Image (cartoon, rainbow, N blue to C red):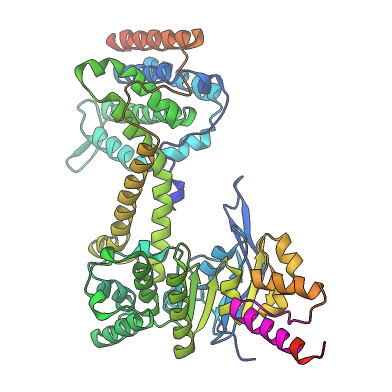
Amino acid sequence: MSVPILETVHLSHVYSEGTPFRHVALDDVHFAVQPGEYVAVIGRTGSGKSTLIQHCNGLLKPTSGQVLFSGEDIWSSKERTHQVRFQVGLVFQYPEYQLFEETVYKDIAFGPGNMGLPEEEIRRRVLEAAHFTGLSDDVLERSPFDLSGGQKRRAAIAGVIAMEPQVLILDEPTAGLDPVGAKQILDNIRAYHQEKKAAVILVSHSMEEVAREAQRLVVLREGKIALDGSPEEVFAHGDELESMGLGVPAMTAVFARLRAMGIDVPASVYTVEQARDAVLAALRRKEGRPC
Amino acid sequence: MLKDITLGQFFPGNSPIHRLDPRAKLVAVIAYIVALFTSQGFLTYGICFVALAIVVKVSTVRLKALVKGMKPVVFILVFTAVVNIFYATGTPIFSIGFLTVTYEGLLRAFFMVIRILMMISCTFLLTYTTSPLALTDGLESLLGPLKKLHVPVHELAMIMSIALRFIPTLIEETDKIMSAQRARGADFETGSLVQRAKALVPLLVPLFISALRRADELATAMECRCYHGGDGRTRMNELHYRPADTVFLICAILFAVAVAVLGAFGY
């Protein structure tokens, strides 16, 4: 394996140290992301997901431990921390609330503008980011406040993508969107991931979503990494996930029950499409057999 | 950084001061401020200080919390002290150029600083020991007679309680938007004054928009629950005036009168 693009070493974070409100949000977390990897971070509210991702681009400083970007500490100098913010793009929950410019174009250009890029380069990046997020050219000249909810969300994500980060982190990018809007956004993220070979960290509550999108799942519980592996490996711990208040995708649960009933179906089924294929395959096998 | 703001914070407790009727406390605070402003010398300021110390002790509010609240006024304190030191005529002690420091000036600066400190302490004591709801209820009840003059007392009280209620929410929101813009490379800490003022635009615009949206949602939510102003509205927690409140109030007023009389004689 190559050097991880992003890595946390013995990362701990304590909120309100020295007061009665002391709270350990992260406890000795070792988390690494390879270049070009698509990782999903799951966990209940308060499990430390948000704290972890805010460490990844230097918005929070570790209480102890290190955060490495390309093997180098992001806190080694002020300049480095500032630069890493452009390399590790962070999209917060409900990012549409951070739109502020007169036009969508100007808002997307805010990040690249802060990077000190020349006008031409900014223009190229804004148009490309708009393309990735499926915003048409006429939208770019409109006020961000006139857009629909889904468009606003995409404009805000474009604002981070325009910085062309090598790691794109998204905190529940589909929260509060309808299924079509949610799917569009996930497709946009996947397009960016594939074309730019960027690593993506997706924080989500939807097991279906992470099972469909991510190559690797990391489960956080009370500030510690509880499970880490491929969707197949993680969802094999169905009971453990259940005890953490998470659970497995609905289809995976159905297929686990089918297997328990003695029917020969695969265990690694997460989506309705996969389930359809598995059921059809099972039926075909049954038909092929003489009764 | 922003979380350190203690403005209007309430520390729940069960001391005799916490249990007092908010109206009694409000009037007592006004009486205390009157007393402070009529104080003239060591005796009257001493009495004010002892009275404050007793109430702080009884209220179980920690001294640390009071001191923390003083931080934002340090500048005003220093400014007041400096102005007062140089703007008094009397026995000169020493002079720097055209500025002369006098004994009277030093004394006046000292009293001024003490006066501001005690005034802030007593108002902090009020907000620390009274829940914002009780406070606005008390205000509304005290200002009740103004309704006859068509002053929208209930509406004012409601505006105040909503404003107090949303201070922590807005602080949290500010923190969030700041983080989000920082993630896009915004810089709020360095640069000249003009640059820093400009850097606030990406923070203030979303903040205003979200505050307006919140206000709109709150108005709808209130209407959904049939809110239509103060007329005929009953309360879940009625204010009950107890004998202890009367005793406290009489003490406070007697105290203010006593200090004012002593002050008038120049003590």
Asked if the stretch drawn in magenta spans residue B128, the answer is no
Residue at the (53%, 66%) spot, across then down: A61
In x, y percent, where is residue B21? 46, 18
- A217 lies above or below B95: below
Residue at the (67%, 80%) spot, across then down: A230
Q: Is residue A118 left or right of residue B22?
A: left
Residue A210 at least partly seen: yes
Asked if the stretch drawn in magenta spans residue A277, the answer is yes
In x, y percent, where is residue B79? 28, 40
Quadrant housing the C terminus of chain B:
top left
Q: Please provide the residue range marked out in magenta.
A: A264-285
In x, y percent, where is residue B38? 29, 16
- B216 lies above or below B251: below
Report the residue that reaches farthest toward the front: A291
Along the line of sight, the residue nearer the viewer: A120 or A129? A129
Residue at the (35%, 37%) spot, across then down: B223
Residue at the (70%, 70%) spot, across then down: A254
Along the line of sight, the residue nearer the viewer: A234 or A162? A234
**Which image quadrant is residue A115 in?**
bottom left
**Which image quadrant is residue A241 in?**
bottom right
Q: Is residue B212 left or right of residue A62?
A: left
- A190 lies above or below A149: below
In x, y percent, where is residue A211? 61, 76
Q: Is residue B48 left or right of residue B195?
A: right
Report the residue that reaches farthest toward the left: B98
